[in-house]
Amino acid sequence: MLQRIFTIVIAFPMALVLIALAVANRHDVRLVLDPFRPDTPALSLVLPFYAYLFGVLALGIIAGGLAVWFGQGHWRHAARVRTQEARRWQAEADRLTRERDANATGGSRQLIANSR
């Protein structure tokens, strides 16, 4: 429910604004990557302005995803440890159940044999 509200209230209007900016800014822009010779740069990039907008958006999404991924590393580790513990306890419970059933079956056979 919260994700749907986020999509409707925030993401959808932001997407509309970004699309409007992309349509309005289709002209080429030169990105100079040489701070020492801006007039005759050794390295520059000429792209439509919207390409820079989408590029920065993609970099922001990737950086945010990585930050969340590394921030939640502790919780993923704890979940793995708890899962291993749960599997060990489940295996122990299964083993004890099999032993109990084997003892119960063997014990009832022994009672029947002793009553004859």
Image: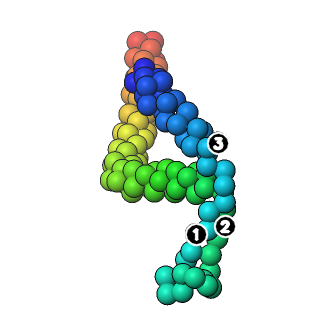
Task: Classify mark 2: residues with Cα within 10 Å, few (<14), some (14-19) or many (20+).
Answer: few
Q: Secondary structure at mark 3?
A: helix
Q: Is residue 3 visible?
A: no
Residue 12 located left or right of residue 24? left
Residue 52 in view of the camera: yes
Q: Quadrant of residue 30?
A: bottom right
Q: Residue at x 48, y 24 (%)?
A: 8
Q: Which residue is mark 1?
A: 31
Amino acid type indicated by mark 1: Leu
Query: 68 or 7: nearer the eye?
Result: 7
Q: Earlier in the sequence, mark 3 or mark 1?
A: 3
| Numbered label attached to residue 63 | none
Q: Secondary structure at mark 1?
A: strand
Left or right of 28: which side holds 98? left
Which residue appears at 38% of the width and 34% of the height?
93
Question: How far is mark 3 from mark 1, CA to CA?
Answer: 19 Å
Give how far apart the Cα atoms at labels 2 and 3 are.
Answer: 17 Å
Circle 2 residue: 46
Q: Quadrant of the C terminus?
A: top left
Query: Residue 20: image x %, image y %?
Result: 58, 38
Q: Name the residue at 43% across, 52% down.
A: 64
Residue 9 shown left or right of residue 27 in the figure: left
Residues at discs 2 and 1 in contact (Cβ within 8 Å): yes
Picture layout, residue 116 above or below residue 30: above
Residue 62 position (above or below residue 40): above
The mark nearer the N terminus, 2 or 3, is: 3
Which amino acid lies under the numbered mark 3 shown in the image of this protein?
Val
The picture places residue 77, in percent across and down from the top left corner, at 37, 52
Q: Which residue is mark 3?
A: 23
Circle 1 crowding by C-alpha within 10 Å: few under 14, some 14–19, many from 20: some
